[in-house]
Image (cartoon, helix red, strand yellow):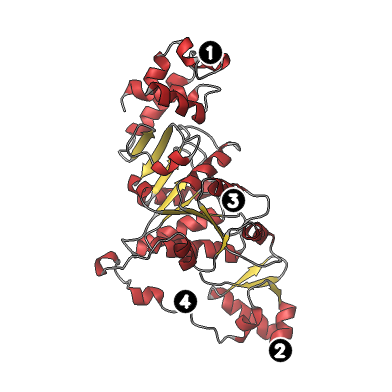
Amino acid sequence: MDHDELGAWLRLLMTPRIGPLQARRLLAAFGSPQAVLAATPSALGTLLSERDVAALCQVPPELPAVVARTEAWLAASPHHQVLSLADGRYPAALLDLADPPPLLFAQGDLALLQRPAVAVVGSRHPTPQGADNARAFAAALSEAGVVIVSGLARGVDGAAHEGALEAQSRSLAAGGTVAVVGTGLDIVYPKAHSALAARIREHGLLLSEFVPGTPPLAGHFPKRNRLVAALSRGTLVVEAAVQSGSLITARLAAELGREVLAIPGSIHAPQSRGCHALIKQGARLVETAQDVLDELHLQRPVLQVGDLLPDESPQSSAAGHDEPTADPVLAAMGYDPVSQEALCARTGLGPAALSARLFELELLGEVARLPGQLFQRVGRA
C-alpha cells in the first residue's frame, strides 16, 4: 500500500460521522477510497446525508500526523502489516459483520487468520478454577490445531492466550493464538500484559482496527468484542458475571450465527451466573475440550513424530489427567468452595492436620485458597 492509498484509507476511517458501515457502502458503490474521495457531492448524496457529505469533503486536521505515525509504525518491522477491505489477506470471517473495519493493523503471523478458531472469553476477575479452566481448555484446543482468539484482557483472556502459547511450546501442530485489542498496536493494555503481548507478537498475532497511537478508551472494547466473535467459529465463555463484556461477545456471536458454549460452575459463585444464564438461553454446556471440538465439528489432528517438540510425546502429554483421586481431603472437598471447618467435619481430621494437608495440596496445585478462608479443588479440563 503506497502513501496515497494509505492516506485515502485513513481519511475515510477518520472522517467524523462515517463509520465502518457507511464506509463499506461507499466502497461498494465507488470501488476504492480514492474514488470515494474524488466523487462529487451530488454523487455522494445518493448514499449519504447532507451533513455526512460535508464531513467527507473536509480533510481531518490530524490526518497528516496519523499518516506519518502509521507509516513509521509500518516501517519499524516487516511483521507490521495493514490490511484493507480490498486486501486478499483480509479475514473473510469479518465480512459477516455489517460493519467490518475498513483497515486492520496486524503484528505477527497472518496465516492464523485462515485457520479454524474458537474465542475463549470470560471474567477479568476469575476464580482460580476459572483461570485454570481457561488455560487448560485453550491449551487442549490449540493442541487440536484450533486458533484461540481472545482480547488480551486480565483474567480469563490472559489465561487463554497463555494456554495456547504453552501448547505451541509442546507441539508444532498447535493452533496458536490471536489477541484482538482495543488500542493501537504500539500500546499494550493492560500494561501488566506487556510480556504476554510480546510472546503473542512473536508466536501468534496481535490485531486491531485502531490506528497506532490510539489509547485504551472505554468505547473501544465493545467494538473489539465484535471482532473476537466474528473471527471465531464459536465463543466459549469460561466464567462471567450476568452483566459483563463476555456476554456481549456471546450475544454478538449468536447474532452472527456462531456457536455459543459455556462452562458451568458453582451455583454459589457470582462468576458462574453469566455462564448459567447463557446455558438457560440455549448455549451448549461443555465440560471438556472434546465437547467444544464435537460441537464445532472439528477433529483432532493425528500427530506425527515431527510435530512434537523435544521431551514431548502423545503418551506423556496425555498421562494422568483422568486418574481418580484417592486423597480423602480432595474427595471431601468436591468442587465448590468450602471452609476449613466444614472439611474438618467431613474428613474427621483435626484443624492442625487438615491445615498441613491443605498447604501440601496448595503446593501441588490441587487446591486454591480463596478469600474468606475458603478452599476450592482445582479441576482439570
In terms of secondary structure, where does tag 4 sit? loop
- Report the residue at 45% width, 47% height from top: 231
Q: Local crowd at mark 3 within 10 Å, few (<14), some, or many (≥20)?
A: many
> Disc 1 vs disc 4: which is toward the camera?
1
According to the image, label 1 marks what residue? 54
Task: Give the mark count.
Answer: 4
> If the image is split into quadrants, where does the N terminus sit?
top left
Give the percent coordinates (x, y) of residue 300.
37, 65
> Disc 4 vs disc 2: which is toward the camera?
4
Left or right: residue 89 compared with residue 325: left
In terms of secondary structure, where does tag 2 sit? loop
Amino acid under disc 4: His
Q: Earlier in the sequence, mark 3 or mark 4?
A: 3
According to the image, label 4 marks what residue? 321
In terms of secondary structure, where does tag 1 sit? helix
Distance from the alpha carbon under mark 3 to that under mark 2? 42 Å
According to the image, label 3 marks what residue? 246
The residue closer to the viewer here, 50 or 190, is 50
According to the image, label 2 marks what residue? 348
Q: Earlier in the sequence, mark 2 or mark 1?
A: 1
Name the disc covering residue 113, or none. none
Q: Residue furthest left?
A: 306
Left or right: residue 191 compared with residue 281: left
Amino acid under disc 3: Ser
Q: Which of marks 1 and 3 is nearer the N terminus?
A: 1
Q: In which quarter of the image is residue 340?
A: bottom right
Amino acid under disc 1: Ala
Q: Quadrant of residue 297?
A: bottom left
